[in-house]
Amino acid sequence: MDENVKNQLDQIANVIDEKIEKANGQVLENANGKIDSVLKGEINNLTQKFNERMDAIEVANKKNFDSLNSQKEDKSFKGGLIKSINDGALDSLKNGMSRSARFELKADMTMNADFSGEVVPADRVPGYKYDPTRAVHIRSLIPQGSTTSDVVRFVKESGYSDGSGTVAEGATLSQSDFDMSADNNTVEKIGAYLRISEEMLADTPQLTSYISARVPAKLLAKEDDQILNGNGTSPNLSGIITDAADFDTSASGAFYQSVESANEWDVIVAALNQLALSEYQATQIILHPTDFHKILLLKDSNNRYLKDQVYAGLQPTFMGVPVVLNTAITAGNYLLGNFSQGTQLWIRDNVSIEFFREDGTNVRDGFVTVRYVERVALTNYLPNAFINGAFSTGKTALETP
């Protein structure tokens, strides 16, 4: 209690005591025991002031107490729940007077402050999520064979002198010559490895299945690049584009400088014609997705899409020739030809994936080595069965001066 207030109360109490003593004296002096009316009024007034001052002090103390409690009040969900129960929120339910109880908790709730641990369990989606791999690999477009050797040899016609012609009766026939040569293609290895801890394999569900599905797809993507673009220098394959005939940009080309406002579609038509002049019929056209969709946006002089005249079905086809989208071919280039006649993929060891503990320091370090590898050879029998080139150079060759 404040010292000043205490002193004031003490002074009032002393005055009351003096008045009471005086009243007692008057009682003794007056036989009839009557207190002087004036003195009695003074005592009543002092008593009333004392009570008023005490009431004021109690009210002030209660306000201070409530203020301190409100500052210290637990704002959490738990604190609000305890306070509501202590205030009788569940009394009617406990006394059997009600079948339910409803009360409002005015507390600031947050996940971090009020919940600890995994209070709300997460829905676990099985498996591993990853971007898709190529829908079509080049090996699916060409014939495949198996070999037990490290070299695949084939004989092809390297030259031909045609002496066929009409002759008069009794005249000597002209001679035709065929030149043959043997060509060798070496089996090459494509592969890689990775290391995974034993704990990952043991503690991570479906990791082995994920690796077994994901890794070979990456290997086949590298195979696609080799089949198309390999430069022929070991350990690289000799790719189809490397060996294929180039688009004829010379003045002897069938459509040389004869196309007004030449575009990508014009180049494809000219390349198909060049292939037909070599007596081949195209089985596939391989385009980068960007070039394919660029062709779909081409319009004629009347602002009509060309695709409406050349594109058919869900499987894209240009003039009846299936179009294959593949990111292994460089954007801006194209390859078309007879893939069933012109080339073949030879498989010595097909795509395999193996797990090894005994590799390097794996045993000491607790790792497992994952190796994926294949051994293949590519034989491009007939380079003239394919036409490849860049759209930019093709359009320049076709464009009218």
Image (tube, rainbow, N blue to C red):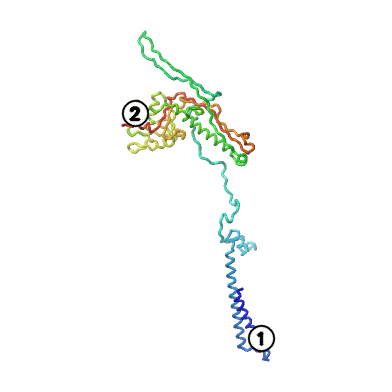
Circle 2 — which element? loop
Quadrant housing the C terminus:
top left
To which quarter of the image does residue 175 belong?
A: top left
To which quarter of the image does residue 292 belong?
A: top left
Circle 1 — which element? helix
Callout 2 touching callout 1 (CB < 8 Å) = no
Q: Residues within 10 Å of mark 2 (few under 14, many from 20)?
A: some
**Nearest the eye: 299 or 287:** 287
Residue at position x 44%, y 25% in the image? 383
* Residue reaching furthest to the top: 170
**Nearest the eye: 363 or 80:** 363
Query: Which mark, residue 100?
Result: none
Distance from Cα at disc 2 to Cα at disc 1: 139 Å
Residue 85 as seen in the image, left or right of residue 129: right
Q: Please tell me whether residue 321 is drawn above or below residue 131 in the rendered image.
A: above
Residue 31 as seen in the image, left or right of residue 122: right
Quadrant housing the N terminus:
bottom right
Q: Amino acid at mark 2?
A: Tyr
Residue at position x 67%, y 91% in the image? 29
Q: Percent position (x, y) of residue 13?
A: 63, 81
Residue at position x 46%, y 20% in the image? 156
Q: Percent position (x, y) of residue 84?
A: 60, 62
Q: Residues within 10 Å of mark 1 (few under 14, many from 20)?
A: few
Residue 202 as seen in the image, left or right of residue 157: right
To which quarter of the image does residue 179 belong?
A: top left
Q: Percent position (x, y) of residue 141?
A: 48, 29
* Residue at the disc numbered 2: 256
- Disc count in the image? 2
Q: Percent position (x, y) of residue 178?
A: 43, 16
Q: Amino acid at mark 1?
A: Glu
* Residue at the disc numbered 1: 21
Q: Of callouts 2 and 1, which one flags the residue occurring earlier in the amino acid sequence?
A: 1
